[in-house]
C-alpha cells in the first residue's frame, strides 16, 4: 500500500538479479476517482539501456472482453487476469484464424494471471498465420469477470491495448 499526491506519479521498480523476466499484474484502487496511465519500460541490465516501453491503459473487468485484430500472429499475445481474490474462473479465448474462431479453454485461480503468445495457446496458430476478426475472452462460469490485454512484440518494440468489455 502506498500514497500518491495529486498531480504526481509513483515509480515502482522490479529488478531481476538472475536476469529472468517476471510476469504479473497490478491492481490500483482508491476511495477517490483516479485518472492516468501505467508506463512499462524494459531496461537492459547492467547499463540500464532502454529496450522498449509502452503505455498500459486500464482494462475493465467483464464477462466477454474483446477487440478486433488484423495482421500476422507473430509476437501477438493475450494476458488475462482473475480479479477475484476468492473465486476461480473458467474462460475461453477465441482466436480469429482464417475465417474460423479457434477456442482455447483456460482456468484461472483466485488472483491468478496468465500471458501467452497465441502460437503457444493453440497448435494451429503459427507465427506467420493471418489473424482477422474478433479476439476475445469469454467467462464460462457463474457471474464472474475477467480482465484482458493484448500485447504485440515486434522489432518496433512492445505495444499493448486493453480488451474492451462487450455488452452481454
Image (cartoon, rainbow, N blue to C red):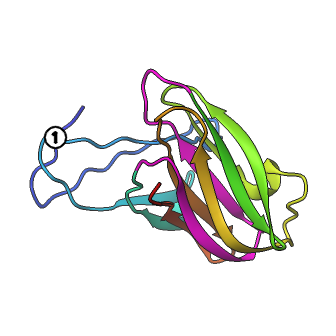
Residue 139 in the image: above or below residue 71: above
Q: Which of 58 and 49 is in front in this view?
A: 58
Magenta span = 61-88
Classify residue 132 as left or right of residue 39: right
Q: Does the magenta stretch include residue 70?
A: yes
Residue 164 coordinates in the image, percent (x, y): 47, 62
Residue under the point 57% across and 26% down? 109
Which of the pair 23/21 is nearer the observer?
A: 23
Residue 68 covered by magenta stretch: yes
In the image shown, does 165 or 120 lie closer to the viewer? Answer: 165
Q: Quadrant of residue 100?
A: bottom right
Taking the image as shown, residue 4 lies to the left or right of residue 66, namely: left
The residue lying at 50 percent from left, 36 percent from top is 82
Residue 75, by quadrant, is bottom right
Dividing the picture into quarters, in which one does residue 1 lie? top left
- Identified at 47% across, 41% down, the residue is 145
Residue 51, can we see it?
A: no
Q: Position of residue 88 (x, y in %)?
A: 55, 26
Residue lying furthest top: 86
User: In this orientation, which residue lies closer to the viewer: 153 or 90?
Assistant: 90
Q: Residue 165: horizontal and vertical position, in percent?
A: 45, 58
Q: Which residue lies furthest to the front in this view?
A: 168
Residue 162 left/right relative to 113: left
Residue 69 seen in this snapshot: yes
Q: How many marks?
A: 1
Q: Is 29 situated left or right of 121 in this image?
A: left
Say which element carries label 1. loop
In the displayed structure, would residue 140 be above or below residue 65? above
Residue 69 placed where, x, y %? 65, 73
Identify the residue at horizontal 84%, vertical 73% (top origin): 98
Residue highlighted by disc 1: 3
Amino acid at each position: 500500500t502506498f500514497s500518491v499526491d495529486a498531480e504526481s506519479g509513483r515509480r515502482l521498480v522490479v529488478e531481476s538479479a538472475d536476469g529472468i523476466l517476471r510476469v504479473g499484474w497490478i491492481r490500483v484502487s482508491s476511495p477517490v476517482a483516479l485518472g492516468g496511465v501505467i508506463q512499462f519500460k524494459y531496461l537492459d541490465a547492467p547499463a540500464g539501456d532502454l529496450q522498449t516501453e509502452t503505455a498500459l491503459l486500464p482494462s475493465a473487468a467483464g464477462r466477454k472482453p474483446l477487440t478486433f485484430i488484423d495482421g500476422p500472429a507473430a509476437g501477438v499475445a493475450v494476458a488475462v487476469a482473475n480479479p477475484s481474490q476468492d473465486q476461480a474462473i473458467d474462460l475461453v479465448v477465441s482466436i480469429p484464424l482464417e475465417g474460423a474462431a479457434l477456442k482455447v479453454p483456460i482456468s484461472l485461480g483466485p488472483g491468478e494471471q496468465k500471458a501467452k503468445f497465441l502460437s503457444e495457446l493453440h497448435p494451429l496458430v503459427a507465427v506467420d498465420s493471418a489473424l482477422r476478426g474478433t479476439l476475445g475472452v469469454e467467462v464460462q462460469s457463474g457471474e464472474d469477470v475477467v480482465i484482458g490485454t493484448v500485447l504485440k512484440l515486434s522489432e518496433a518494440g512492445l505495444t499493448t491495448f486493453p480488451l474492451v468489455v462487450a455488452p452481454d
